Image (tube, rainbow, N blue to C red):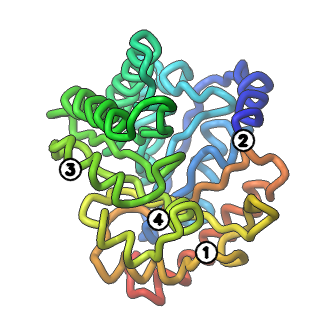
Amino acid sequence: MAKTRREFMVSLGSALAAPAIVTARPATKRYPIGFSTLGCPKWDWKTILDNAVKWGYASIELRGLQGEMDLPKRPEFSASGVKQSLKDLQALDLRVSDLGASTNLHVPEAAARQKQLDEGKRFIDLARQLQSPYVRVFGDKWVESEPHEKTIERIVLGLRELGAHAKGSGVGVIIETHGDFTESATIAEMVTKAGLPEVAVLWDTHHTCVAGKEQPADTYKTIGAKVRHVHIKDSVPSGSEVRYVLPGQGKLPLREIVRVLAANKYKGFYGLEWEKAWHPEIEDPEVAFPHYAKVMTEYLKEAGVAP
């Protein structure tokens, strides 16, 4: 996957577009669903917003835009462009559920670590301007040749530093169940040790089910009180790996995940993480996004979640 990401950055990283201006539309009730822009790496800002409204989405997770993963570098989110982008969102009654930073908090080398923290802080500042409540970060990896406790301590210190930067901004920092940290107990330990109200969890349900081999109800018991955003995707086994498929067509217990969240009064968004940017062979967003809206709306209705 790392190789695919590097190739993606090289091929698309220079793509920039002028900020778009959208036309206001009447607000309508929508189910709490969203999608990550990781799933539509070729779409411009206006296309993202127009399609979100067309298919009944209430939110967008910003994880790159037209090849640029460092969002503050995009004209839409520059000092001069961000105010118009916020107006575009408000005109369509859309929320930015969170910003997906690439910040990795396990990094031990001082200069590289500072670069990671600086990115996280820039994303927090941008989230405040976009009135987005969260910035996603990674613990990411165990560091070879050091005890796990030391890696956890470093990640906790990073969460505290970012949480302190976010204090008073209305923005929280959410660490994703991702990479080497797909077991909910480890994520719970990190967030508890960080000890800040600004630090919480993004539950990537695929990672805890497939890599962590946990049942949704068990995961929720461990981290549920701290979950602020949820990633949804589906897959089938493929050798020693998995192959991503349209939600509802794979082996993930998506209905059960929704039931668990709804029964526990989860108030966040149910976000589709369709990794088209990293896996170009999967279906295009024009197929995956309306499909997810239909399937997830069905699951939410069954679970008693209202728009």
Q: Amino acid at mark 1?
A: Leu
Ranked by sequence position, the earlier of labels 2 and 1 is 2
| Residue 270, numbered label | 4
Measure the alpha-carbon separation of dots 3 and 1.
28 Å
Q: Are marks 2 and 3 in contact (CB under 8 Å)?
A: no
Q: CA distance from mark 3 to mark 4?
A: 24 Å
Dot 3: within a 10 Å radius of its alpha carbon, few (fewer than 14), some, or many (20 or more) residues? some
Residue 7 relative to residue 232: left or right = right
Label 2 to label 3: alpha-carbon separation: 30 Å
Q: Amino acid at mark 3?
A: Thr
Q: What's the residue type where badge 2 is placed?
A: Met
Q: Which element carries disc 2, helix, strand or loop?
A: loop
Going from N to C along the chain, the mark reached first, 3 or 4, is 3
Find disc 2 in the rendering and name its residue: 1
Horizontal side of 190 relative to 146 (left or right) equals: left
Question: Measuring 73% from the left and 55% from the top, which residue is drawn there?
Answer: 285
Q: Earlier in the sequence, mark 2 or mark 3?
A: 2
Q: Which one is nearer the viewer's eye here, 55 or 171?
A: 171
The residue that mark 1 highlights is 252
